């Protein structure tokens, strides 16, 4: 949640601009707010504008446009070094913070002309090592579904099974799952709409397992959901308090199910289930990469390409299938036979 009263006005204006004109989601705005709060706190400390020793308590509401003008590219570099060394932030986190700072200063210098010069204009992004996504194997995915389906001690078994089924079959993001309303589902056409990043709407087709899991849950779903700011009365998934289920609760449900299935919950998460769905569809369903991009709601095909990885056994088989794989063995055999004949 964004506490606007704790921000300088130019920061609140930037966040409003991102939502209204850049079509950024509330989640994106909250992330920008968090990143820039950290950045401005550091600058107050860096410029000796505060005596507060607790970083989280540094007040930034009095940060002015004149203070912004003092910031140079070197100051930003020192902030990134602070994140990497003092805060132990990884390259991906630093890259995200740099991206936020770039967008912020571009807005200040070009859109509102609050500052004359843009200190982040030539800011470089740290090189990121490409890592393959972690995912459950097909066998582990089946174990997870079996556990969720057979967990008779769980009074919310139908709900939790539907949640895990949608993650593993549709590759949903966490925010997309908690945002599903019953009215988003077209039962006659076996499909639903979800709101993804940048408030972009896309269609998700539901297979037989998804439809069955949803219908089983709807048969026991409380029909007296609360009418509140979260539109809980319209939500598909509800908590015990009859409110729209929270992200944190979904994460807890997934972690508990993983542990019960004998899988390490510390290695996997709701987002890893999204990776699992994409990987299984690509490896077993022979899904076209463009279709996978559309399903996952990726803006760039390069993001989807991480799912084109193959396992070590496939790599081994590929090498073994090379027509030259047995050349030396055959060559040595022919040489020996030739030597025998000559003798």
Image (cartoon, grey):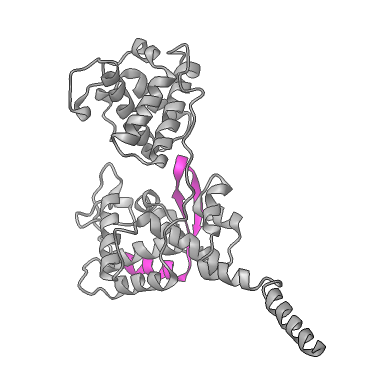
Which image quadrant for residue 35? top left
Residue at (47, 18) in percent of width and height? 118
Query: Residue 313's spot in the image, x, y percent?
Result: 52, 71
Query: Does 209 appear above or below 339?
Result: above
Query: Does 258 appear above or below 250?
Result: below
Tell whether 27 sits left or right of 310: left
Residue at (44, 22) in percent of width and height? 105
Query: Residue 273's spot in the image, x, y percent?
Result: 40, 60
Tell whether 231 sits left or right of 207: left
Residue 205 highlighted magenta (yes or no): yes
Residue 246 highlighted magenta (yes or no): no
Q: Quadrant of the N terminus?
A: top left
The answer, for residue 182, to whether it is visible in the render is no
- Pick the residue in front: 177 or 105: 105
Query: Residue 224's spot in the image, x, y percent?
Result: 23, 56
The stretch of residues the image draws in magenta is 191-218
Q: How many marks?
A: 0
| Residue lying at the far front of the rendered structure | 343
Tell whether 248 sits left or right of 92: left
| Residue lying at the far right of the rendered structure | 342
Residue at (43, 29) in percent of width and height? 18
- Pick the residue in front: 232 or 65: 65
- Pick the residue in front: 61 or 334: 334
Which image quadrant for residue 92? top left
Query: Does 202 appear above or below 106?
Result: below
Query: Residue 47's spot in the image, x, y percent?
Result: 29, 16
Q: Quadrant of the C terminus?
A: bottom right
The answer, for residue 121, to whether it is visible in the render is yes
Residue at (34, 57) in percent of width and height? 269
Which image quadrant for residue 252? bottom left
């Amino acid at each position: 949640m964004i506490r606007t009263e704790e921000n300088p006005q130019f920061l609140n204006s930037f966040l409003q601009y991102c939502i209204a004109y850049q079509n950024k989601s509330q989640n994106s705005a909250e992330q920008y707010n968090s990143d820039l709060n950290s950045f401005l706190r550091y600058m107050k400390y860096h410029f000796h504008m505060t005596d507060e020793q607790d970083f989280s308590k540094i007040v930034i509401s009095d940060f002015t446009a004149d203070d912004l003008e003092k910031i140079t590219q070197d100051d930003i570099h020192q902030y990134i070094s602070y994140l990497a060394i003092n805060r132990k932030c990884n390259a991906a986190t630093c890259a995200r913070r740099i991206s936020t700072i770039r967008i912020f200063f571009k807005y200040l210098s070009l859109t509102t002309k609050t500052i004359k010069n843009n200190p982040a204009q030539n800011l470089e992004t740290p090189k990121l090592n490409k890592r393959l996504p972690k995912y459950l194997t097909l066998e582990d995915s089946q174990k997870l579904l079996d556990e969720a389906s057979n967990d008779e001690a769980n009074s919310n078994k139908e709900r939790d099974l539907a949640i895990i089924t949608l993650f593993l079959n549709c590759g949903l993001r966490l925010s997309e799952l908690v945002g599903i309303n019953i009215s988003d589902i077209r039962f006659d056409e076996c499909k639903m709409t979800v709101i993804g990043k940048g408030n972009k709407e896309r269609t998700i087709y539901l297979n037989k397992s998804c439809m069955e899991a949803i219908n089983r849950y709807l048969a026991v779903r409380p029909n007296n959901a609360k009418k509140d700011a979260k539109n809980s009365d319209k939500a598909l998934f509800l908590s015990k308090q009859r409110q729209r289920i929270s992200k944190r609760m979904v994460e807890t449900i997934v972690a508990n199910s993983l542990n019960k299935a004998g899988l390490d919950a510390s290695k996997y998460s709701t987002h890893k289930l999204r990776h699992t769905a994409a990987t299984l569809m690509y490896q077993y369903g022979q899904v076209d990469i463009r279709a996978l991009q559309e399903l996952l709601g990726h803006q760039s095909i390069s993001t989807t390409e991480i799912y084109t990885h193959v396992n070590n056994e496939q790599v081994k088989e590929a090498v073994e299938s090379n027509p030259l794989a047995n050349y030396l063995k055959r060559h040595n055999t022919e040489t020996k036979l030739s030597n025998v004949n000559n003798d």
